[in-house]
Image: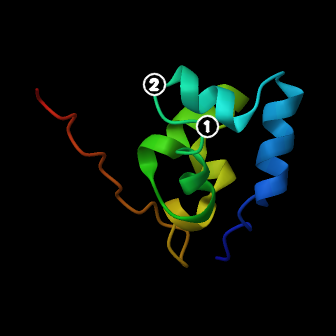
Amino acid sequence: MKTKPDWHQADIIAALRKKGTTLAAVSRTAGLSSSTLANALSRPWPKGETIICLAIGVEPQKVWPSRYYDSQGNLIPRPQRAPNKG
């Protein structure tokens, strides 16, 4: 079973704009530097993917299927790290 292709970065940015926001604004709202969430567009980062997808209303697995499903279509376990204590 072949997985669907990941969304293009421009499609993710466009989805955010359609919701009336930007990647930088979502990043700042999450308490991050304005450019931090851009990392999730080019490399796996479950926390960042979740933040972006909450803003656009789509599950991360639909935006980045290659990060969540193997070539057989099986879900890849991707546990998030525990928050820092301090």
Give the quadrant of the C terminus.
Answer: top left
- At 55% across and 79% down in the image, what residue appears? 71
Q: Considering only vertical position in the picture, is 4 above or below 12? A: below
Q: Considering only vertical position in the picture, is 27 above or below 60? A: above
Q: Which amino acid does label 1 sit on?
A: Ile
Q: What residue type is labelled 2?
A: Gly
Residue 58, position as x, y percentages in the image: 68, 36
Left or right? Give the position of 47 relative to 40: left
The residue labelled by disc 2 is: 31
Residue 59, position as x, y percentages in the image: 61, 39
Left or right? Give the position of 39 relative to 78: right
Distance CA(mark 1)–CA(mark 2): 13 Å
Q: Quadrant of residue 27?
A: top right
Q: Quadrant of residue 82?
A: top left
Give the quadrant of the N terminus.
Answer: bottom right
Q: Residue 52 carries which label?
A: 1
Residue 7, position as x, y percentages in the image: 76, 58
